[in-house]
């Protein structure tokens, strides 16, 4: 039975691609009934086709899909759950005429009765009639395609037709058709030479269809050439080949591979990019397609239809267009040592912006991406093992993030430096910034099989406990890991050398070194030295640990903040002398001790007033200056004798000289001597800094001349000169010359360059120009002081050993005082310690009156008298 119902309905409501009038439609249906046997126009069901939008992925490019719903009535009979129906498609002619053309297609339609839980109950028939049943959507049209001389079909039963050229109807021939050597039937040849057999039964796969003609007299022709027919109901497959999830540019190239069990090419392949279809070439099974993408996620769907009309399962994949490299870098790069001690394994935290990673290695810090330093690339997991390392060599490692589209970040992770050492042999880990750890043989361990990987890292400031006055960026973590993966925490068998770099802008003498013990910073009070060449602070350590540099808070006139007011502060005033805050764009001007925005005489006075003071904010031993000498300082002494005043007075002229072949900004020193052997009688400033300089007034105390200091005023353009004088000092010799020379020494010598940095110098041995020492003779010198009140000293010299007697008389010749000195050896008795002392009293202990007095020196062979005055 048919689907029931007549054509019926309102023809005016049916629009298929164009407006069709009811009269035209009826004429077309009638014509179909005339040319196609078995079609009853009154049993046709009108289908209102609706365009499916958006277009499904299994529709060939250039085609559209329409759908219609067909109700099943109670008169519909079902056989084995399947139904074969004919579909007639009517449309207006393509030449825009009013003619209506039709296409007749047989479709295999599969459907089942509406399902319900009571299907097997007595109400089963009623359930078939329920009106809310879901429509059947699985229908297969019979497709027969001819390609390269072969036929492809999705139906097991197809009609076979043919034509005999120049056929003579009088012959009355018939044709027998075979499929795979099995006879499918015999059909007569029509008058026009055509013949048609329906159906021809096919088996899955390749079928060979042949035929021959037979006359009325049973004469047969030769077997025809086989017609190859592929019966195929297997869906083809289509796939993306090596399609990544991300690309960095558009258009992008996509490879698509088609495969079908028939071995033939595709009927069509369609690629949808974000719902927009584009045709794909079917000439080859593997084809490359260029697609235009939008920024971000793009949905790619590919489907194919084979020559038999089978539609593949649509395959979809997301493709992200990401044209920006990550702006982040991985963190927490760490390393561990293999059991053999010759391989280092690295790991780091996952970067959510990365699809893969590149690892770099260099012998210098890695600040930017350099392909020559790339050790490994496109690492999809955050780990790697480096098996190509040299024991004793220091390496820097850095890792970058690579986007899923393959774009690499230009930001490199915090570098990890490491050095693999055979622990018992020791070695050195040295960094480009001067950081260093040197362990001697046997310093770490005596185990000959133990390897360790040593690292010197600069931790983030936030990862360190607070330390008031700490200098940012000076923290250093010295650490090591052993083969078992555990940190090396044991104390060393002997101390190792550690170097910590300090900022070039800081005065190293002012810096303090702290070591982290637990969560507490502890000041290193001794053992820290300065290496000016490498700009590091060097110290000894007995275990690995964390160190940090600190600058104590200082007074305003402590311009370099080292806790001492010395030549460096004076040099800073001198260098910026005359400058103001406006001159350097409002920044805090250096050398402004009184903080008034101008470096002037008041700043010099402020620093000079506090010169020599120190502020021991944190007790620490002074750091020694290390480095290659860049100049020489020497002392030259000239010895002479002065015979004026009746006494033989010996003089020493000391010249302190400097030979430094570079520009000098200032210097300071103090001179020490034995006050028992020498008396300062004169001081002159030097000419080392030229005329545009400022010299402090020396501070003379017994046995010491302090504050011998000078600074250049303004910026110097001199590049240094030949040997120049720092100071000239005149002494009166009061004792043995050799002992006096040995007592002279220079202390606190500091010479500063134009950057207020100390210049290492070599202090040469003293040179002398001695006058032959004259033979000592008897003499009586003038008392000193004179006039005096109430005490004085009477100097004298002896040519030989003798008893010495001093007598003091008034102007009337009366004896006032007798001083019996006793036996004295030959020599000079002119110093206060050796001269005869008179306290201004007579023999009865009474103070004598003001006036003129005479004193007489008497020995066995010599008598001499001098005059003196008491003035009250």
Image: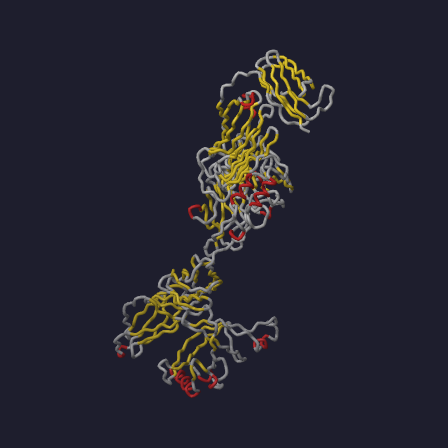
Q: At which x and y percent is residue 12? A: 47, 86
Using the rendered view, name the quadrant where residue 528 is placed.
top right
Q: Nearer the viewer, residue 325 or 760?
A: 760
Q: Nearer the viewer, residue 806 or 253?
A: 806
Image side of residue 742 versus residue 233, left or right: right
Residue 840 location (% of width, % of height): 69, 23
Name the residue furthest top. Answer: 860
Is residue 544 toward the left or the right of residue 161 in the image? Answer: right
Compared to 155, does 787 lie above or below? above
**Quadrant where the C terminus lies?**
top right
Residue 522 in sight: no
Camera-side residue of 346 and 595: 595
Residue 383 percent across, percent down from the top left? 51, 47
Q: Which residue lies at the image location 65% right of the left edge and 27% below the top edge?
A: 788
Tell me how many marks there are: 0
Residue 470 visible to an observer of this rendering: yes
Question: Quarter-wise, where is residue 511 in the image?
Answer: top right
In the rendered structure, the answer to whether residue 720 lies left or right of residue 676 reads left
Residue 594: % across, % down: 59, 47
């Amino acid at each position: 039975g048919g689907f029931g119902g007549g054509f019926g309905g309102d023809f005016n409501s049916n629009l298929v691609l164009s407006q069709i009038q009811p009269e035209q439609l009826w004429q077309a249906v009638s014509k179909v009934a005339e040319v196609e046997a078995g079609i009853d126009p009154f049993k046709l069901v009108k289908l209102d086709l609706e365009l499916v939008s958006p277009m499904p992925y299994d529709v060939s490019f250039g085609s559209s899909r329409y759908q219609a719903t067909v109700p099943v009535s109670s008169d519909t009979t079902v056989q084995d759950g399947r139904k074969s129906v004919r579909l007639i498609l009517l449309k207006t002619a393509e030449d825009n005429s009013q003619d209506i053309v039709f296409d007749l297609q047989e479709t295999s339609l599969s459907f089942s009765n509406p399902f319900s839980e009571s299907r097997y109950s007595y109400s089963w028939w009623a359930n078939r009639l329920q009106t809310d049943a879901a429509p059947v959507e699985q229908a297969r049209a019979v497709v027969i395609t001819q390609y390269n001389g072969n036929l492809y079909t999705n139906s097991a039963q197809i009609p076979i037709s043919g034509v005999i050229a120049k056929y003579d109807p009088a012959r009355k021939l018939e044709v027998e058709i075979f499929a795979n050597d099995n006879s499918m039937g015999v059909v007569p040849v029509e008058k026009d030479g055509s013949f048609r057999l329906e159906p021809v039964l096919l088996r899955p796969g390749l079928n060979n269809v042949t035929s021959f003609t037979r006359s009325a007299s049973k004469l047969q022709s030769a077997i025809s050439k086989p017609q190859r027919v592929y019966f195929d109901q297997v869906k083809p497959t289509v796939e993306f080949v090596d399609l990544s999830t991300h690309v960095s540019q558009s258009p992008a190239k996509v490879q698509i591979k088609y495969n079908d069990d028939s071995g033939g090419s595709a009927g069509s392949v369609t690629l949808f990019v974000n719902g927009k279809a584009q045709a794909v070439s079917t000439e080859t099974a593997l084809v490359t397609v260029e697609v235009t993408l939008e920024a971000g996620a793009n949905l790619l769907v590919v489907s194919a239809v084979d020559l038999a009309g089978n539609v593949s399962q649509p395959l979809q994949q997301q493709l992200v267009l990401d044209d920006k490299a990550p702006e982040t870098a991985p963190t927490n790069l760490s390393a561990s040592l293999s059991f053999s001690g010759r391989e280092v394994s690295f790991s780091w935290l996952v970067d959510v912006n990365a699809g893969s990673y590149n690892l770099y290695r260099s012998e210098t810090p890695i600040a930017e991406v350099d392909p020559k330093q790339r050790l490994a690339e496109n690492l999809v997991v955050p780990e790697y093992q480096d098996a190509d390392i040299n024991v004793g060599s220091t390496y820097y490692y850095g890792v970058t993030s690579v986007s899923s589209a393959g774009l690499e970040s230009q930001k490199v992770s915090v570098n990890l430096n490491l050095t693999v050492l055979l622990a018992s042999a020791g070695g050195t880990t040295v960094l480009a910034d001067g950081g260093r750890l040197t362990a001697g043989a046997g310093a770490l361990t005596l185990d000959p099989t133990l390897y360790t990987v040593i690292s010197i890292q600069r931790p983030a400031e936030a990862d360190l406990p607070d330390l008031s006055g700490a200098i940012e960026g000076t923290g250093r973590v010295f650490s090591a890991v052993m083969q078992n993966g555990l940190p090396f925490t044991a104390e060393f068998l002997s101390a190792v050398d550690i170097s910590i770099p300090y900022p070039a802008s800081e005065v190293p003498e002012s810096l303090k070194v702290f070591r982290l013990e637990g969560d507490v910073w502890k000041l290193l009070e001794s053992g820290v030295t300065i290496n000016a060449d490498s700009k590091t602070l060097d110290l000894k350590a007995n275990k690995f640990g964390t160190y940090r540099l600190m600058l104590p808070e200082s007074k305003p006139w402590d311009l370099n903040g080292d806790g001492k007011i010395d030549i460096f502060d004076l040099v800073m005033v001198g260098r910026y002398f005359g400058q103001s805050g406006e001159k350097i764009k409002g920044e805090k001007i250096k050398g402004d001790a009184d903080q008034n925005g101008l470096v002037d005489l008041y700043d010099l006075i402020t620093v000079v007033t506090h010169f020599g003071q120190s502020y021991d904010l944190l007790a620490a031993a002074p750091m020694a200056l290390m480095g290659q000498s860049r100049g020489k300082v020497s002392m030259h002494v000239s010895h002479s004798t002065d015979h004026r005043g009746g006494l033989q007075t010996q003089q020493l002229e000391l010249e302190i000289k400097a030979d430094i072949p570079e520009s000098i900004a200032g210097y300071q020193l103090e001179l020490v001597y034995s006050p028992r052997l020498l008396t300062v009688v004169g001081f002159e400033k030097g000419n080392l800094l030229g005329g545009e300089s400022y010299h402090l007034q020396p501070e003379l105390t017994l046995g010491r001349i302090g504050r011998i200091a000078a600074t250049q005023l303004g910026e110097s353009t001199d590049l240094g000169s030949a040997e120049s004088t720092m100071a000239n000092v005149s002494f009166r010799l009061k004792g043995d010359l050799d002992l006096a020379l040995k007592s002279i020494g220079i202390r606190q010598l500091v010479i500063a360059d134009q950057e207020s940095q100390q210049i290492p110098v070599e202090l040469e041995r003293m040179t002398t120009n001695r006058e032959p020492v004259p033979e000592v003779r008897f003499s009586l010198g003038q008392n000193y002081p004179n006039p005096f009140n109430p005490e004085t000293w009477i100097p004298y010299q002896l040519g030989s050993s003798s008893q010495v007697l001093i007598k003091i008389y008034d102007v009337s010749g009366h004896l006032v005082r007798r001083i019996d000195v006793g036996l004295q050896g030959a020599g000079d008795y002119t110093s206060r310690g050796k001269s005869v002392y008179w306290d201004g009293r007579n023999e009865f202990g009474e103070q004598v009156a003001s006036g003129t007095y005479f004193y007489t020196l008497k020995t066995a062979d010599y008598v001499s008298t001098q005059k003196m005055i008491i003035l009250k």
